Image: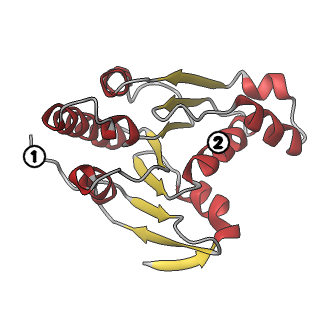
Amino acid sequence: MRTLPTSSAPLVARASLSPARMVVVCGDHAWTLGVHLAAQMACEYKRVLYLCGDNRFDVYAVARLVRSLDENQEEALSRILVARAFTAYQLDELIHRLSPEEAFGVVIISGVCTAFYDEDIAHSDAARLFYRSLRRLGDLSRGGLTLLLTESVAPKGAKRAYFLTDLCRASNVVMRLEDEHSFTLERRRDHLKLAE
């Protein structure tokens, strides 16, 4: 585990993205980093799929970032496809519709745990859906997709906190943006295989 200055987080996250890799960014500003990378990759002429599980996608923020990179906003924004999930069931369905054969530079899923933290869903259902989705994400990554998973929300209680712990364990790279001036970077060699 390494501690690095927060100013280097976008560069480290971008350098960590590669095919067949699952990168997790967690902390208060994780969603900001996800939006930044969506804009950056769209400006690099790569298609981006942004699955929004926390209802925080901000097209205006993306447009400002694209403009700051001196790119054609309309052209760059056309390379970002957005799908919003308002429930854990919808997020699970969107994740299961993904295919490793799709030609995306990156698939970004914001609030990857947030939808499963919803207290309106029974804990057993939330856990079943979360682990079903996590297994699918691992399969997609091993199949060649580049995945960036962001989580900015902490669980309200300890009862579901292990979702984020297990997500981090199943990932190749974990960036924890929990400090204002620095972040921790953890690299793992292989995916952990989740039991069926």
**173 w.r.t. 77: above or below:** below
Density class for disc 2 (Cα within 10 Å; few <14, some 14-19, many ≥20) is many
Q: Looking at the image, which is closer to me, 4 or 98?
A: 4
Q: Which residue is drawn at 17% across and 31% down?
A: 125
- What is the three-letter code of the residue carrying label 1? Ala
Residue 80 in percent (x, y) is at 65, 27
| Number of numbered markers | 2
Residue 152 in percent (x, y) is at 50, 50
Q: What element carries label 1?
A: loop
Q: Is mark 2 on a helix, strand or loop?
A: helix
Q: In which quarter of the image is residue 122?
A: top left
- What is the three-letter code of the residue carrying label 2? Val
> Mark number for residue 35?
2
Residue 161 in percent (x, y) is at 28, 55
Spot the residue most to the left: 196
Q: Quadrant of residue 174?
A: bottom left
Residue 10 in percent (x, y) is at 66, 58
Q: Residue at x 62, y 29 (%)?
A: 47
Q: Residue at x 37, y 34 (%)?
A: 115
Mark before the other along the chain sequence, 1 or 2: 2
Which of label 1 and label 2 is nearer to you? 2
Q: Looking at the image, which is closer to me, 190 or 35?
A: 35
Indicate the quadrant containing the N terminus: top left, top right, bottom left or bottom right. Answer: bottom left
**27 w.r.t. 2: above or below:** above
**91 w.r.t. 142: above or below:** above
> Mark number for residue 195?
1
Q: Looking at the image, which is closer to me, 152 or 38?
A: 152
